[in-house]
Image: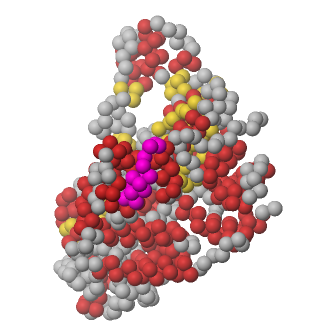
Amino acid sequence: MTQVPPSYRGSADYIVTPDLLQVVNAAFVLGRPLLVRGEPGTGKTMLAASIAGALDMELITWNIKSTTKAREGLYVYDTVQRLYDSQFGSRDVSDIGRYIKLGRLGLALTAPLRAVLLIDEIDKADPEFPNDLLWELDQMSFFIPETRETVAARERPVTIITSNAEKELPDAFLRRCVFHYIAFPDRETMAEIVRVHHPDLEQNLLRECLNAFYRLRDVPGLLKKPSTSELLDWVQALVLGGIDPQALTREMPFTGVLLKRQRDHQTFERYLRAHKG
Amino acid sequence: MFDSFFFLLRENGLKVSLTEWLDLMEALDRGLAASSLYNFYVLARAVLVKNEADFDRFDRSFRQYFGSIETPPEVADQVWEWLKKNDLFRDAPPDRPPWEAWNLEELRRRLLTRLATQDAAHHGGAHWIGTGGTSPFGHSGYNPAGIRLGGASHNRSAVKVAAQRAFRDFRRDETLGTRQFEVALRQLRRLSAHNEEQPEVLDLDETIETTGNNAGRLRLVWTRERKNTLKLVVLLDSGGSMNQYSTLVNRLFQAVNKSSHFKDLKFYYFHNCVYDDVFLEPMCRRNASLPVSRLLRLLTPDYRLLLVGDASMSPGELLMPYGALDWNAANKEPGLAWLKRLAGHFTHTAWLNPIPERGWENAEGAYTIELVGQVFPMFELTLEGMGGAVKKLKARSRS
């Protein structure tokens, strides 16, 4: 790497812990992909957007699905279009290059300025998927046999990979990454996060909200624990509904915003009944 | 300068590679640790450790090496004490809401990952399931409380298990090493384009053919993507003698469970041998069972049958009517008859045995292993054996 990359300091709408900051910058310097894991709703995906925003880089997102193939991220050869064009003679079909469409990784490599590439939920794909990308992520280049061209990065993109640990990732792949586990935010960090989104929130209300929220998260047996995004929605609902902070100690309005499953509502009600007396 | 730290990490079971170590050195050269031990800690962890389950192991190594914080060993002990107390959950009255049990599992999972080493935790886990049982495996099994219940094979009542089955769910947080199994399982597929998907893949050969027939006017032919049509039914032995293999079987279970590429995947459990019923849960409780006769009607013969068990039992369990280990299982026909029935129904079957193959002849249950091996093609539960079993299940015709 020839230039010293600008270092990331977090952004206004995204709270980063000092640990994560350091890890992000280490990944920058080493030119390694950063693998981020953590509970849903801990802002894994947001991190990439925040980095892109803070450093004024383009964000290129590659959403992985169970059917995603590694090659799709590099390029797609549009045979059908070429066949059509050859039929109707509307375009010069001898130039195969016109029918090569770069995928998300390809776009990130060819971006004129250093870009942020987010490979979202890599564990959704086939177990072989990460291995198929080893060379490309290592070298940040790939070869297109159809046109005999090599696509190589002008600027090594900042690569953020998120995983929900649904599947295990291959060791060879992991060796090439820098890893960070985003823990669920503690109360103080959470207060900061809420304040970023609701700067005018009363101190009282915020405290009671967080109390109620963490109490709810501690209810045993929830299938889906409410996460940050649900808390933010809930606070929004409370603000709009004009709820008195004191009321939160007695009851919990709008639980539908926090709990998404029927079973969880029943669990919660049972828990409340059991802890009343 | 930290070379011995590298070796310490490896000694403590962290698979730190040289690539990662060199990355860390480079990061240090570039001043990323900013000459602070804490920064070094964060940096080293991010570069060297790739799984949060290993964080604790790393922490301990770090403390050991840099000695700034003391490792309190009593924490681990405390956790075990705690777990033992909650062990009573198994006997919880049935009207208790199910989420409490689930929660115990969750707590256990978290605590286990926090424990010193994964291996020790699992070892302990087996201990927890079958406390104190020391009888050789294959001899009529253990009961959950760990009391040996062996006995002469001809004395039917002596072989019966009076106690309830231990709480043991394979769906635990055991993920280490499942990947290899997963990859082996991926071979288990029969691709076919005859599925219900919308045709969306261009069939190039067919397109050229029809375009040619169409005097050069382009005619596109689409085809369906080839999908796996293989259906798999897995019967798992959750009998007492399988306790010692729980880690291994966990891995297999996780791998099979994660394989989303089967057209259909069914899991049932049995206790030492299959009799009139199979069970829906590892606890093999009567109220969650399925008669084998129904199973055979339900599943067409083209389901691949994979049995996992040590096949090691007292001969009576396999050969005698009413030989089943459980009190309330009154099997009129011997287990072997049921096994043969299964083998006769399904066209492709295989048995995976966690006992290494070289031990089959000398194992406690050598006699029953041999008998079962005559009914089902038997393989050891290793990557290699799994490959053989997969091949058997994939074979075009019965062999």
Residue shown at 63%/43% (left/top)? A9
Is B133 or A270 nearer to us in this picture?
A: A270
Q: Quadrant of residue B119?
A: bottom right
Residue shown at 23%/84% (left/top)? B327
Q: Position of residue B370 (x, y in %)?
A: 39, 76
B229 shown above or below A150: below
- Range of magenta residues: A197-213
Numbered label tally: 0
Q: Position of residue B212 (x, y in %)?
A: 40, 14
Is A87 or B287 nearer to us in this picture?
A: B287
In the figure, is residue B250 to the left or right of B68? left
Is B397 or A8 nearer to us in this picture?
A: A8
B324 shown above or below B96: below
B19 shown above or below B59: above
Is A149 or B139 nearer to us in this picture?
A: A149
Residue B2 seen by the camera: yes
- Quarter holding the N terminus of chain B is bottom right
